[in-house]
Image (cartoon, rainbow, N blue to C red):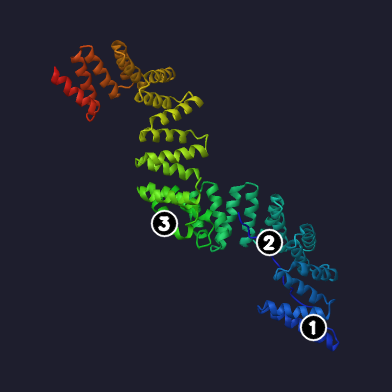
Amino acid sequence: MRTGLILFFVALSVVGSAQSAPDARDYQRRLIDATNTYKSGDLQAALDSFEKLHGEDPSNVDADAWLGFLYLRTNQSVKAIPLLEAAAKQRPNDLEVLNNLGNAYFMNGDDDKALTRYGEIEKLNDKLFEPYYNTGNIYLRRKNFSDAINAFTKAKAAKPDDPYVLNNLGVAYEGQKDYEKAATEFEAASKIDPTNTTFARNAGMTLIRLHHTAEAIPFLEVAAKGDNADSSVVLALGDTYSKTNRRADALNYYEGIKDRMGSNASFWFNLGVLRDQNNNPSGAEEAYRKALELNPNDLDSINNLGLLLYREHHYDESATLFDKLSGLNPGSVSAKLNLAASYAKSGSLPKAIEVWKTVIRSDPSRNLVRLDLANALWDAGDYDGALYHYKQALAREPNSAEALNGIGLYHLRQSKLAQAEAAFRSAIEADPKDVPAYNNLAITLERMNRRKQAIAVLERAQKINPADADVTKNLQRMRSSG
């Protein structure tokens, strides 16, 4: 999370009283004029005036203090330090000078000296806001979240409506992984300053972390405004629309920011998902391809494009993608299975068989994969290999209708009709809606000269699935030949 790491500088409220000598009175008048110049908003003119005054009298405490303060305002902490140190020696109890000196040390990276000065202020006045806030920033920079929380809590007590204090207190809570308290502070900061994108971002992203998705949306909508919005916020907003069933809003949002996010691969992937969900496969394909142009090895984009192409019957290209995915992510079983399915659909059955064998070797318990392998071996003419895997599948799942049907086909091919009949009947018992088993049983009964029983079996199958072409064809043939 980004913090509001700004320091609170304290402008000096007064300059010293005029002395009696004419030159001293003139010098004092010029000090007052320079102060008024600063108060009028002309920072550079004030800086020029105080530099001139300091040059004329390097020991003047007012000139030292003011010039040191102005150097801080212009990010010149190295120049500010010696001036503020000199002023602090002359005015050791001046809270403004001490605070600005602490800030100068902080800006210069000398945190220990800064903390010492802020501690001196607390002893002099434990109600002052600025040193607590600045101390909290130091501890936050050091990732000392416990002490940062303590300091920001004191700053909050002194100034309860300051959004920077609330935001940074939230960052400290976040550092301690207390996301509930962090979200409370971030939300409070954002409500005080609703246009601040940092506060809104912190609130929205923390609420997402807490799975308060709907509550995150208004904060993310603020944080996502503008062409320079953090890409993670833009993507998160689209994702929250989707997760809250506002897919049309998500799609419209993403379509509207294509020019802004066109070089972000994650954006194109998310747009692909949304287009696919909204029944636009060609648009989804375009988005996934753009995602891969930007990040050719993105696993999710390769996978989703592969699945889309498989669904659209472009099996050769889906096989190419799943082959790449398997190489990039060798441990992905789903990539291998999708590769095998693509090979099988594209007519590359031997390649599919090899992939399925690889999966089975690594995990013999995958019965569905084993059945795919057995069926492929059968289609490839390796009947003994198919039988082996059907039996292996049946050993692990005794009621596997598909394995029983496969074993029945093997026996039927061997003209072992009694064994075939027993296997097919067992398949039907295991799955009373297994139409292929009914069809195969009818063929077996026909070969056993039990045509009447075979017709009865096919009639049962037709009631289960009237549209099955094999059943209809065999039933017509048996009836006409009877």
First-in-chain label (3 vs 2): 2
Image vertical order of residue 32 relative to residue 197, above or below: below
State how far apart marks 1 and 2 are (Cα).
34 Å
Secondary structure of residue under mark 3: helix
Residue flagged by tag 2: what amino acid is it?
Ala
356 sits to left or right of 462: right
- Is 406 or 142 nearer to us in this picture? 406
Q: Camera-side residue: 345 or 174? A: 345
Q: Position of residue 65 (x, y in %)?
A: 78, 73
Classify the position of the C terminus by image quarter. top left
In this view, which residue lies farthest toward the bottom?
Answer: 22
Kindly state the secondary structure of the residue where label 2 is placed. helix
Q: Dot 3, crowdedness within 10 Å: few (<14), some or many (≥20)?
A: some
Residue at 78% x, 63% y: name it. Answer: 121
Residue positioned 23% across, 11% down in the render: 448
Q: Which residue is mark 2?
A: 158
In this rendering, position of residue 295 left or right of residue 404: right
Evaluate whether residue 317 shows in this view: yes
Rendered location of residue 19, percent (x, y): 84, 84
Give the residue type at disc 1: Gln
Q: Which residue is disc 3 drawn over?
A: 255
For mark 1, what is the residue? 28
Residue 370 position, x and y percent, is: 42, 24
